[in-house]
Image (spheres, rainbow, N blue to C red):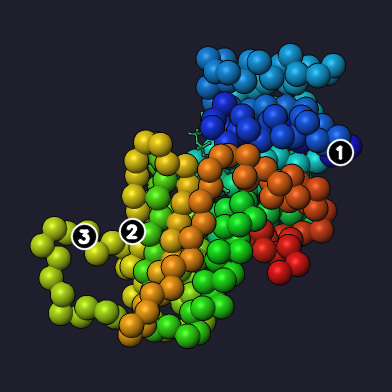
Amino acid sequence: MIRVVVCGASGKMGRTVCKAVHSDPELSLVGAVDKDYEASGIQDLSEMGENKVYLDSSLSAAIKELKPDVVVDFTNPDVVMNNIKIAVELEVDMVIGTTGFTSDKLGEVERIIDGQDVGIFIAPNFAIGAVLMMKFAEKAAKYFNDAEIIELHHNEKYDAPSGTAMKTAEMLSSIKTFEDLGPNEKEILPGSRGGNYKNIRIHSIRLPGLIGHQEVLFGLDGQLLTIRHDTLDRSSFMPGVLMAIKKHKENRGVTVGLDKLMEI
Ligand code: NAD
């Protein structure tokens, strides 16, 4: 049994992860950590199964008490770095879904690990279809000079653009240099043309009712290629999260992207 602590357990993703871990016969949900754990729905978790789940607001206290094999983190970009420091210091592997990892932040994670025998697995998107969307877009990039990304998420999303959109833009620009479409264009309303990542424009839509959606659009004279993925329910992320937990020992140091665990 792999012993798992979920951090951010009261959140939208954390609650879904707790249930998925609890339902998996190879995994044991031993602890649920959230800064708001006393006021939130994770109290229900304490009644899950025969063994009561340990609830806490402190990740370090939970790790010291429970000695888990893996900490799963779905918190927010402001707190995840500190959680990584705690887990590395206490030598526990992590599976991280929290977004906002720029290349600078990934460099900082490398420095925190500093050669220790710890695995930190980070995926900006745990939905298998979203990983394939990124891979298909990467393949198409060779044939098009112009690409734009539209990402659509629920209105409570903290960061913009999404981690998936940033990762997609990085993957496309690793294939080729995209053209600056409008060196002379004028934005009447600042921001109208979206964020600019190496000439790939990223547009972030936030509306109630949405979960997580993304389109990658490639234009060429007389044709448009659109590659789209829709997350219709947070359960879409769970097979990827469970896969990363089960394979935690295979990855040492920092590993980024679910594609690293899939044979694509
Ligand atoms: P949410 O706001 O519903 O949940 C975040 C939870 O973290 C909250 O319950 C909050 O109380 C808790 N938290 C904040 N600071 C904490 C701390 N210091 N210690 C413990 N808990 C703390 O957000 P969400 O929609 O569940 O998303 C969480 C993260 O996951 C975001 O970064 C989001 O972008 C990301 N996300 C990733 C994927 C993926 O596939 N990788 C999918 C969906 C969301």
SS class of the residue under badge 1? loop
Do callouts 1 and 2 mark residues in contact (Cβ within 8 Å)? no
SS class of the residue under badge 3? loop
The amino acid marked with disc number 2 is: His
The alpha-carbon separation of the residues under discs 2 and 3 comes to 9 Å
Residue located at (34% from left, 50% from top): 205
Q: From the image, tell me which residue sits under label 1.
A: 26
The vertical placement of 238 against 31, above or below, is below
Please give left or right for residue 255 compared with residue 23 in the image: left
The vertical placement of 263 against 199, above or below, is above
Residue located at (35% from left, 53% from top): 204
Please give left or right for residue 145 compared with residue 5 in the image: left
Residue located at (10% from left, 62% from top): 188
Q: From the image, tell me which residue sits under label 3.
A: 192
The alpha-carbon separation of the residues under discs 1 and 3 comes to 48 Å
The amino acid marked with disc number 1 is: Glu
